[in-house]
Image: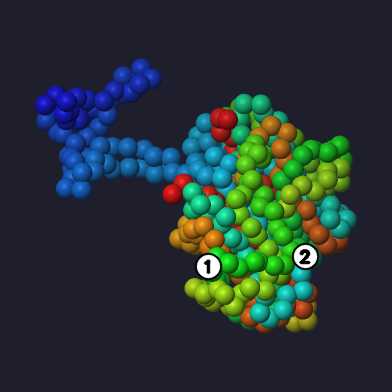
Amino acid sequence: MERVGILDGTGSGNALEVNSDNQVSVRTVIVSALHNASLKGDAFAWNAVSANIDTTDNMIIVNNNSSTRWLVIDHVYVKGDIAGQIDFKLADTTGLTLDGTAITGVNLNRGSTKIADATAKCDDTQSAATTVFLTYYQHLAVNAQTTTAGMQRIDFGGSIILGEDDAFGMDTILEPAAGFEATVIGYFLDK
Amino acid sequence: MDIQIVNTALGDSTVTAEVNSDHQLSCKGVGVTAIHEATLKGDAYSWNAISADLAAEDTALIVCNESKTKLLVIHKCYIACDLATAVDFHVGEPGTWAGTAVTGVNLNTSSRNIASATAYADETGNTQGSIILTGTSCVHTVAQESTAEPVTYYFDDAVILAEHDCFGVDVIGDIAARFECTIIGYYIDA
């Protein structure tokens, strides 16, 4: 067996340390999987605002159309003008036709011309076909005469993964009067 | 050919690197963020804008990457204003600039690098690009006293601007007089 040390490739003469615990000493620049996907042009935002949402409708739903790539849901922003529950849902959309207003995914890398292989809708009515995996409470802050709905960010840390014809949706249980904002940030990953 | 990694850094080549029972090289690492790494190189900047009388839907702050060779990564953005209202974060093309020029501040004080970017506050010349997030500003009212509360939006380095691409922050409501908006970003090689 050959024994080797590792030298700096830039010619500084620095040598790699192996410590007394037999560990190689490393320094790592940590980038998020979302950033890495965005560098490849594979990260997208889907944004929906201010539709007249009925109590059973999805504010926003995003369906993965790709047979070769996963769609990873990284995080969402949501705000509604009514205090109440918001259901986060997953769905098998095989055989379903999502309805509502079409949303085009925005590529987060402006240098990329890739288009999201996904269908997204605002004010979709197929929420009955979905499974709730998280119920979040949207609160309103009322101080003196002012009522304010705060924007909430919910991180999934890449833990929501959609296969082909699988969808992620957000559904307000109570009917907002007029206003909501909902954004889904996700990225595609090779299977 | 099998090799064994030995310690040559500290002059004791009897110390060797471990490969564990899961067949992994044993390492002890210092993890740093990408923005820290960029700051060390003098490539991280902030663009800051305050206190203009924004009309409804004006752009509080917009930053455009002017570099042919580097990508501008948007890390995060602070926004506060004297009205609780929606805030659109959008990406798009530059327009005919109309506003107050903002100079990027290098976050590494020992660096002389200058941001290859154009930035404007209270900008009215751009056409709003594709909205990537509709956020909100917060105002808390306690005992008749209203206070604007800053909100931080983390973009997790996912927003990447090539040459002549812009990132803008539009305040949808008509604020009275006051806002604060800061964009933090950094350059990486394209």
- Please say if A116 is above or below B16: below
Quadrant of the snapshot with the C terminus of chain B: top right
Q: Residue at the top extreme?
A: A11
Q: Which residue is mark 1?
A: A92
Q: Residue at x 56, y 30 (%)?
A: B189
Colour scheme of the rendered structure: rainbow
Q: Is residue B119 visible?
A: no
- Please say if B163 is above or below A145: above
Residue type of the residue flagged with mark 1 = Asp
Residue B17 has which mark?
Answer: none
Q: Nearer the viewer, residue A134 or A27?
A: A134
- Secondary element at image label 2: loop
Residue type of the residue flagged with mark 2 = Thr
Q: Which residue is mark 2?
A: B85
Q: Residue at x 22, y 35 (%)?
A: A18
Q: Nearer the viewer, residue B111 or A69?
A: A69
